[in-house]
């Protein structure tokens, strides 16, 4: 039976990953995801999990080993952050292209430089278009749940794609939270052993990672794009089943007090919970604020977004990364492109917040809401603002 | 129906571009890449087999008399055999 526990979220992520019975774990610890592979190494060393744990010499090797393990049919788990993800970079786009399911917990951390170990989303945004399914946890409970869901989604033969479970570095990885942990029996029932579509084995001849000549590369890319788009059906199915089994509901975009909301804010990740407190306070003042949280980022939930912002006068899109030299920050760029064809759409304000671990407090969110309230009349000077930046 | 060289449409592609036919790379004739071809002169050849060892395509084979020849279906014309053949028994000519 599920049990309520109080635990650091990174440790809980390791515990639940172990409950998923991975056959192979290859990881290289890097702040702030460190406790995930570290604790998994302990679990394996103590004999609680029958698993090949590969303490490789780099992230490049970690993800390469994961690719090979997934190709022979293993259930595979890994974890990293920031520069570690970039060091994996060469392998990152190959895995979805080869349709190899792997689950990766990404403890989101700012990219260097300047060197910084704290939280923002510049790491995941650097790989967002490389073909992985992208889920964002807003708290510890969602981290636990999404790791189990991710295996079931990724390994489904209609999907066969790697899944990134994003959890904010420190804000989540290092926080002790009260969470409900499923037990082994429940996880086993929800997540049967992987049945690989094909495995590299001398008895069943298959070539994986074949050459894509100009005559076939275009079609191969189209097939990969379609696979990611179509994975949404399975994601929604798995989330339905999760709700039925465990009673916790998951949707691509979660909404909070958006009914009749005048100004709506969109968050991605753990900022959601702080912003929700701001929304509550604003409601007390009679300010009709609403909040959305994007749990599914790839494939991009375009239809859900259009439905979620209907009726709002202003939409504030928060971003946790700078798209240097770009027209907009990454999440907002996509939101705008989705809403462009809508006959009626809200005025859009783009606030880049919480870079490199900068705190964003309740009163900051209140300020953003109040400032944005006039955005449909007074056009903001720039397409985006880096909130709270000190300037002279 | 003649077998297709590669899938026509994106829907026909195996997931991950997996190929289930063994040794299917053989059906792709890399000889078409060639601009020059090697000519092996048996009067100069000492049957050392260095060309056979160095050919990156593995397309040089030994005949019954111990001389070597390139399979032009696969020879890419890289000229490595020409470069390595120290008795100068190989020359590259326009194809
Ligand atoms: S390298 Fe030259 S000499 Fe040696 S076997 Fe080949 S052709 Fe003959
Ligand atoms: S030219 Fe290159 S490919 Fe052709 S036979 Fe010589 S070494 Fe082989």
Image: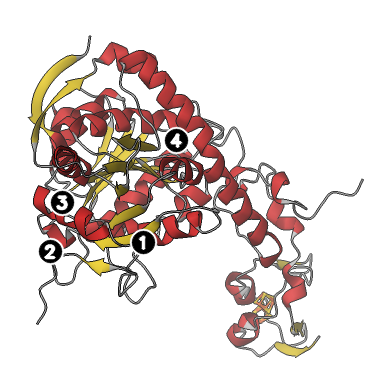
Instruction: Please name the residue that numbered disc 1 is placed on.
Output: A376
How far apart are labels 4 and 3 at the CA level?
38 Å
Q: Marks 4 and 3: which is nearer the front?
A: 3
Q: Marks 3 and 1: which is nearer the front?
A: 1
Looking at the image, is mark 4 or mark 1 earlier in the sequence?
Answer: 4
Marks 1 and 2 on same chain: yes
Looking at the image, is mark 4 or mark 3 earlier in the sequence?
Answer: 4
Instruction: Please name the residue that numbered disc 2 is placed on.
Output: A116
Residue A366 is marked as 3
How far apart are labels 3 and 1 at the CA level?
18 Å
Residue drawn at point x = 78 percent, y = 53 percent: B8
Label 3 crowd (10 A; few <14 / some 14-19 / many >=20): some
Q: Marks 4 and 2: which is nearer the front?
A: 2
Q: Position of residue A180 (x, y in %)?
A: 19, 20
Q: Chain of mark 4?
A: A
Q: Is residue A317 left or right of residue A219?
A: left
Q: Chain of mark 2?
A: A
Which secondary structure lies at badge 3?
A: helix
Instruction: Please name the residue that numbered disc 4 is placed on.
Output: A154
Q: Position of residue A105 (x, y in %)?
A: 27, 42
Which secondary structure lies at badge 2?
A: loop
Residue drawn at point x = 54 percent, y = 52 percent: A209
Which quadrant of the structure image shows residue A192? top left
Looking at the image, is mark 1 or mark 2 earlier in the sequence?
Answer: 2
Looking at the image, is mark 3 or mark 1 earlier in the sequence?
Answer: 3
Instruction: Quarter of the image for the C terminus of chain A: give it.
Output: bottom left
């Amino acid at each position: 039976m599920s049990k309520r526990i109080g635990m650091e979220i990174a440790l809980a992520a390791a515990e639940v990953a172990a409950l998923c019975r991975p056959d192979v774990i290859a990881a290289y610890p890097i702040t702030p995801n460190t406790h995930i592979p570290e604790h998994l190494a302990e679990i394996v060393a103590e004999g609680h999990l029958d698993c090949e744990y590969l303490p490789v010499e780099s992230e490049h090797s970690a993800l390469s080993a994961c690719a090979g393990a997934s190709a022979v049919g293993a259930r595979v788990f890994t974890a990293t952050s920031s520069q570690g993800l970039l060091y994996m970079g060469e392998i990152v786009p190959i895995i979805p292209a080869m349709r190899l399911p792997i689950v990766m917990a990404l403890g989101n951390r700012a990219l260097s430089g300047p060197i910084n170990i704290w939280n923002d989303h510049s790491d995941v945004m650097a790989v967002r278009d490389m073909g992985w399914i992208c889920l964002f946890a807003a708290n510890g409970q969602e981290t636990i749940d999404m790791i189990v869901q991710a295996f079931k989604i990724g390994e489904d033969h209609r999907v066969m794609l790697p899944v990134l479970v994003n959890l904010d570095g420190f804000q989540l990885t290092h926080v002790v939270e009260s969470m409900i942990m499923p037990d082994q029996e429940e996880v086993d029932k929800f997540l049967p052993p992987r049945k690989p579509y094909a495995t590299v084995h001398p008895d069943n001849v298959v070539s994986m990672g074949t050459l894509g000549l100009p005559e076939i590369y275009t079609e191969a890319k189209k097939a990969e794009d379609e696979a990611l788009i179509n994975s949404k059906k399975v994601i929604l199915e798995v989330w339905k089943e999760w709700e039925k089994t465990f009673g916790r509901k998951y949707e691509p975009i979660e909404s909070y007090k958006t009914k009749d909301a005048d100004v709506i804010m969109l968050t991605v990740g753990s900022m959601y919970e702080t912003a929700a407190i701001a929304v509550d306070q604003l409601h007390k003042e009679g300010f009709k604020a609403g909040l959305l949280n994007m749990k599914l980022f790839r494939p991009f939930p375009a239809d859900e977004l259009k439905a979620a912002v209907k009726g709002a006068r202003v939409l504030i899109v928060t971003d946790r990364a700078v798209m240097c030299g770009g027209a907009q920050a990454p999440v907002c760029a996509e939101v705008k492109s989705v809403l462009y064809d809508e006959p009626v759409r809200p005025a859009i304000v783009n606030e880049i917040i919480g870079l490199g671990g900068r705190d964003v407090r309740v009163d900051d969110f209140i300020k953003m809401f109040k400032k944005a309230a006039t955005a449909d009349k007074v056009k903001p000077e720039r397409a985006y603002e880096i909130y709270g930046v000190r300037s002279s | 129906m003649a077998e297709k060289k590669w899938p026509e449409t994106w829907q026909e592609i195996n997931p991950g571009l997996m190929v289930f036919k063994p040794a299917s790379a053989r059906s792709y004739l890399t000889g078409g890449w060639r601009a020059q071809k090697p000519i092996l002169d048996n009067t100069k050849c000492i049957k050392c087999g260095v060309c056979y060892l160095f050919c990156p395509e593995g397309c040089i084979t030994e005949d019954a008399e111990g001389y070597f020849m390139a399979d032009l279906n696969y020879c890419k014309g890289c000229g490595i055999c020409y470069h390595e053949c120290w008795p100068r028994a190989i020359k590259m000519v326009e194809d």
